Amino acid sequence: MKEVTMEKIVNMCKQYGFVFPGSDIYDGFANTWDFGPVGVELKNNVKKAWWKRFVQEDKSTYGVDAGILMNPRVWEASGHVASFSDPKMDCKKCKQRFRADNMIEEFSKGEVAAEGMTNEEMEKYIEDNNIKCPHCGSHEWSEIKQFKLMFETSRGTVEGSKDTVYLRPETCQGEYVNFLNVQRTTRAKIPFAIAQIGKSFRNEITPGNFLFRTIEFEQMELQMFCKDSDSMNIYNNYKERALNFVNDIGLPSDKLRFHDHDKLAHYAKAACDIQYKFPIGWEELNGIHHRGTWDLSRHSEFSGKSLEYLDPETNEKYIPTVIEYSIGADRLTLALLCEAFEEQELENGETREVMHFNPAIAPYKCAILPLIKKNHTDKATEVYNMLSKYFMCTYDDSGSIGKRYRRNDAIGTPYSITIDDETVNNNTVTIRDRDTMEQITLPLDEVVNYINEKILF
Ligand code: ATP
């Protein structure tokens, strides 16, 4: 099997319409990406699978869709205005900018946790170990400074008067500020969770590695509000559920691991990432954090509104503890692309590119392929119109049937349905399986059930 590199994935994505460079005709705009016709289906399916697992199938979880722009006081309460920054340093020779903590972690192969170090401690480590610029090899560093990660914009109501507002750097604040609204309207009893999927923005110092780290990305997050005495059980339960989710959706167990944090925020009791073995190495895929009562206490303090919960059975009043589970939709989509991709050598000596997606997240569930355009177009259109009411289908009538199979292998379509004389005369179709390349014949009226069973997640 050939090695999967990030470069191959980027090229595949561009060639087949998964992901294009952002603002492409203007020579791009660094580290921004646009999802194309195939990619948007893939990412939507990833988001739908997450929502189904964690909201639809969990009667204690409620969804919201909060605004990207929030009252700036939210970001004061959350601590972002004061301290959402990363330590950056510049190479004085080539002027490239780096994250000091990442450099130390990479240099020490993960042995040193730079997260908890002060700027001075990091400078000393870099000096003592003579860490060189990865770009030009020199050792002439600027001093380390904190670099603000929140994007600012302004909202002017009267000419000349401007208020600074922020593009949210995480979605979870929209869940915290709606805690009371959701609890009152749903009459939810603790423990319950609020979930949301949406865009976040971070002015990252070192964006890169394709979709892995970008300045605009989507997060799938939920906050579970609970009693402190139940919180560690709930935390451990989300670790397992989060792992099972990424495993079930297509990432194998031997490329997934827990990474428990040693250094914790002052309010936190525990924190853990799930890492996936990307082509660039083991990297964070998602986080599960025990956040204590920090978030709701701070919002109570800054908003002046009590966010206490009144337990209807015990009459006890308390600020709930929060367990957060957060995963990047784009980062997970990248992991799934890397995992699914194979350049497969066939028995006849040819190579085919294939994306072995779990059928539940495949961009198109089936391809409708009229064998001979002039004979089978009408029937193929009828089949397309019938099946596309149930799931995404793609229609392809150009080129040999072999080439059409290959194109659909490359975009991960699990079932290719050939429309031929048998379909016209007897209402039967041939269905080719993407992974085994084997074909079966089915009556047309059984196709919806056949595919629906395979794509259930
Ligand atoms: P990292 O250490 O990689 O910067 P983080 O610990 O800051 O990530 P969180 O704030 O916990 O990340 O965000 C939760 C999830 O959101 C991450 O696990 C990741 O999947 C995703 N994510 C965070 N930052 C980015 C980014 N710049 N681009 C794409 N996805 C991101």
Image (tube, rainbow, N blue to C red):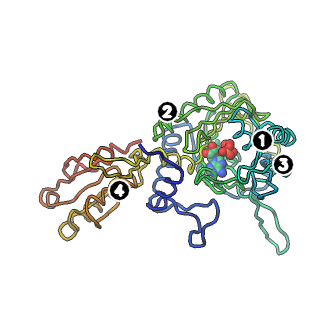
Q: Quadrant of residue 128?
A: top right
Q: Identify the amino acid type marked 3.
A: Ile
Q: Earlier in the sequence, mark 1 or mark 2?
A: 2
Asked if labels 4 and 1 touch by Cβ distance under 8 angstroms, the answer is no
Gap in Å between the C-alphas at discs 4 and 2? 27 Å
Query: Left or right of 64: which side holds 117?
Result: right
Residue 383 seen in the current view:
yes
- At label 1, counting other C-alpha atoms closer than 10 Å, the crowd grade (few under 14, some 14-19, many 20 or more) is some
Image location (x, y in percent) of residue 219: 61, 49
Q: Residue at x 50, y 32 (%)?
A: 254
Image location (x, y in percent) of residue 423: 17, 58
Q: Earlier in the sequence, mark 1 or mark 4?
A: 1
Q: Secondary structure at mark 2?
A: helix
Position of the N terminus, as image quadrant, is top left
Q: Earlier in the sequence, mark 4 or mark 2?
A: 2
Point out the residue furthest to the front here: 137
Q: Disc 3 designates what residue?
A: 144
Q: Identify the amino acid type marked 2.
A: Ser
Q: Quadrant of residue 267?
A: top right
Q: Disc 1 designates what residue?
A: 306
